[in-house]
Amino acid sequence: MIGHHWTRRFVLVPLVCCLVLAGCAGRLPRTYHLAVSEREEALTLFDRFMQNRCNGALDADVTLEMRLLGKTETAPGMLQALPPSHLRYAVVDPLGRSLAIVVTDGSTFTMVDNRNAEAVTGPVDSSFWNEFVPAGIFVEDIIPWLRGRLSDQDIRIADVHGDRDDPALIWLLSSTNDGLRHEIGFDHVEGVLRRHILKNNDNSVVLDVRYSRHDEEDGQCPAPRELVVEGKSITGTLTIRFDRIFHNSTLSPGIFQLDLPDHYTVTEVE
């Protein structure tokens, strides 16, 4: 019962929602095969994108908007990440007080409901965590997705296509050992990702993220200010807006460790 109780309570956590609260994906791209010379040029430009090391700390004020079953809910919050695997998100009230917090170091997690003085903690390979984040998707993957980047794992490009509707887009197709397939929409003119589609082995869209409003303040690593997320689990659309990005932030690993008051009820899951 605890899983359902906490699933409802934490539906506004973007770390969680961007992976599971979604419905039918957006219209899939119409593509065509590139000529050999076009393919080589596309791969050169994508390789240049990948060589930019944009893996510093992320510190931002964000707004989460979830459209689900005809209703829209919004929640302001603070999102902080320290690669490769430290992530913290707090839902805040109008006075900036934390209502709910999720932290993870990539191995364990803690979810806290400050309004009810309750918390759940456990490993990220637990069945409870996998109610939110599908098995096979790791925190090391989530942080680059939020930044409009790709994780540092080896990207083996199997094919490259053009986009029939947008000449600036090229589609790079990649697969992983666990059967997941990536379709990466790369804007070779702007040098940014516009879309990232993740499919499972039965061709269902697990995750479909569209990026827009890239921040040009960091010319080498422009980050998206808006992410629209869809997928297969629940009918709905999630939008994450980065209201303010604090560039060059230095985050201490200590902020990803929570010291809960003694009166909190803490449930440990395995």
Image (cartoon, rainbow, N blue to C red):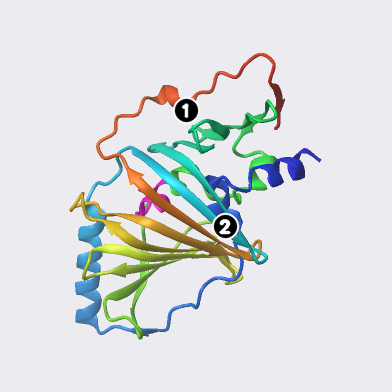
Going from the N terminus, do you reach mark 1 or mark 2 first?
A: 2
**For the point 47% across and 49% down, which residue is it?**
63
Q: Percent position (x, y) of residue 111? A: 61, 33
Task: Say which residue label 2 marks.
Answer: 66
Circle 2: element type: strand
Residue corresponding to mark 1 = 256
Q: Which of 167 and 237 is in front in this view?
A: 237
Q: How many numbered marks are there? A: 2
Q: Residue 8 carries which label?
A: none
Outermost residue on the right side: it is 1
**Mark 2 neighbour class, 10 Å CA radius: few under 14, some 14 to 19, many 20 or more:** many
Image quarter in which the C terminus is found: top right
Secondary structure found at label 1? helix
Q: Measure how far apart labels 1 and 2 are at the Cα level.
A: 25 Å
- Asked if 258 appears above or below 166 in the picture, the reply is above
Is residue 108 among what the camera can see?
no
Specify start and end residues of the magenta stretch as a single range: 143-152
Above or below, 103 against 261 in this view is below
Residue type at numbered disc 1: Phe
Q: For the point 69% across and 16% down, which residue is it?
A: 263
Proximity of marks 1 and 2: CB atoms separated by less than 8 Å: no
Numbered disc in front, either 1 or 2: 2
Horizontal side of residue 189 vs 237, given as left or right: left
Out of 43 and 81, give the one closest to the viewer. Answer: 81
Percent x, y of residue 97:
52, 30
From where the camera sits, is residue 57 visible? Answer: yes
